[in-house]
């Protein structure tokens, strides 16, 4: 009997995407799998649509709204898999994603190895996904992986990981205090419990760019800012538990500096805490600079208005781009349907 893989899908107001997400989970070529969907009190038709796919291998649960981390914890608590694949309800996986990673397991990769894969971002057309190789796209030790993440302000998307149950249990539950970086913090703990990462380039994930509707979007939310600061402090603690030399401390200061544009000037309390932390690490923070696109707004109307423009204008741009991409996706779908009808005739 091949090991059981649990594909765990938290879903909230995902009626636009949930059907395609479930199809990609069902179509995974790894034969021994279970799929568990937990609806987190959606206000749209997510639950009803998910229940259309229920079967012996696909189970749908629902709960009152508790947030993404709590929903993932619920899904894991009812799963039985030897390996766990987390998948957000708006993302997709290549049909052989799980199989490619489980091939590594079958060749003798230990349960304490954290397995990752490639990911590309898209909006409405997964066939147009952009895969850009990053500094984490290789086999790495625990300390080197976390160092690179913090030095270079990069990450691996949630669904790229395949985690043994042994590792997931050793890491502990998802932190329900975290509202946007719960995945980043959780996989840091999985990493700490592991013996290092193994990268499988052909195991592909398609990550949908959702803009301001994404859980990771912070904007002007004080709750998300405070949660992000908690996550950042945990990241620093985790790296220093593995390595606490000059490079590690410099990586921590770089990591703090890269995020300060989110906190300054609205949350000077957090900025001042960050300054103290950077000094304790042997570094010094600078007031975040503005690009030329927003510096003139700062000089004329003040930093608060410049920051507002810095948050809102990119969202406006991406809203236009997403609308265009959605229209092109519909045209592409119609052409595919017409081609299929012509073949049938």
Image (spheres, rainbow, N blue to C red):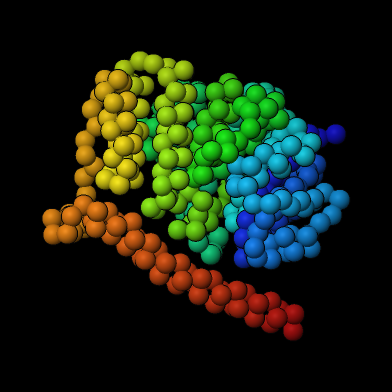
Front residue of 16 and 160: 16
Up-down: is 191 above or below 217? Answer: above
Tell me which residue sits at (57%, 35%) in the image: 175
Q: Quadrant of the C terminus?
A: bottom right
Image-based side of 119 in relation to 47, left or right: left
Image-based side of 270 in relation to 39, left or right: left
Up-down: is 73 above or below 304? Answer: above
Where residue 313 appears, as percent x and y from the top left, is 32, 62
Corner quadrant of residue 165: top right
Where residue 2 appears, as percent x and y from the top left, is 81, 35
Tell me which residue sits at (64%, 42%) in the image: 70
Front residue of 277 and 85: 277
Where residue 273 appears, as percent x and y from the top left, is 32, 30
Image-based side of 53 in relation to 42, left or right: right
Where residue 245 appears, as percent x and y from the top left, is 35, 15
Q: Can I make out residue 98 in this image? A: no
Corner quadrant of residue 51: bottom right
């Amino acid at each position: 009997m091949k090991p059981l893989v649990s594909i765990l899908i938290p879903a909230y107001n995902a009626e636009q995407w949930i059907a395609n997400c479930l199809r990609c989970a069902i179509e995974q070529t790894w034969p021994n799998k279970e799929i568990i969907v937990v609806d987190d009190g959606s206000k749209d038709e997510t639950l009803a649509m998910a229940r259309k796919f229920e079967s012996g291998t696909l189970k749908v649960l629902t709960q009152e709204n508790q947030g993404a981390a709590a929903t993932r914890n619920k899904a894991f608590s009812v799963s039985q898999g030897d390996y766990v694949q987390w998948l957000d309800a708006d993302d997709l996986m290549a049909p052989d994603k799980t199989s490619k990673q489980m091939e590594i397991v079958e060749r003798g990769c230990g349960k304490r190895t954290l397995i990752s894969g490639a990911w590309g971002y898209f909006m409405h057309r997964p066939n147009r996904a952009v895969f850009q190789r990053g500094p984490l796209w290789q086999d790495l030790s625990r300390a080197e992986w976390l160092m690179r993440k913090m030095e270079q302000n990069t990450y691996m998307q949630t669904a790229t990981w395949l985690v043994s149950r042994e590792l997931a249990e050793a890491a502990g539950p998802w932190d329900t205090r975290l509202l946007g970086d719960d995945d980043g913090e959780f996989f840091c703990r999985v990493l700490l419990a592991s013996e290092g990462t193994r990268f499988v380039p052909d195991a592909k994930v398609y990550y949908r760019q959702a803009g301001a509707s994404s859980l990771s979007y912070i904007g002007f939310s004080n709750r998300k800012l405070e949660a992000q600061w908690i996550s950042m402090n945990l990241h620093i603690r985790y790296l220093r538990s593995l390595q606490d030399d000059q490079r590690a401390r410099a990586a921590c200061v770089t990591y703090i500096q890269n995020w300060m544009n989110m906190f300054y000037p609205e949350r000077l309390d957090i900025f001042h805490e960050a300054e103290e932390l950077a000094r304790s690490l042997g570094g010094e923070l600078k007031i975040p600079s503005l690009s030329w696109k927003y510096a003139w707004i700062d000089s004329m109307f003040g930093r608060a208005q410049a920051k507002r423009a810095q948050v809102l204008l990119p969202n406006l741009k991406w809203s236009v781009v997403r609308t265009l991409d959605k229209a092109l996706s519909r045209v592409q779908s119609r052409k595919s349907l017409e081609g299929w009808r012509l073949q049938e005739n």
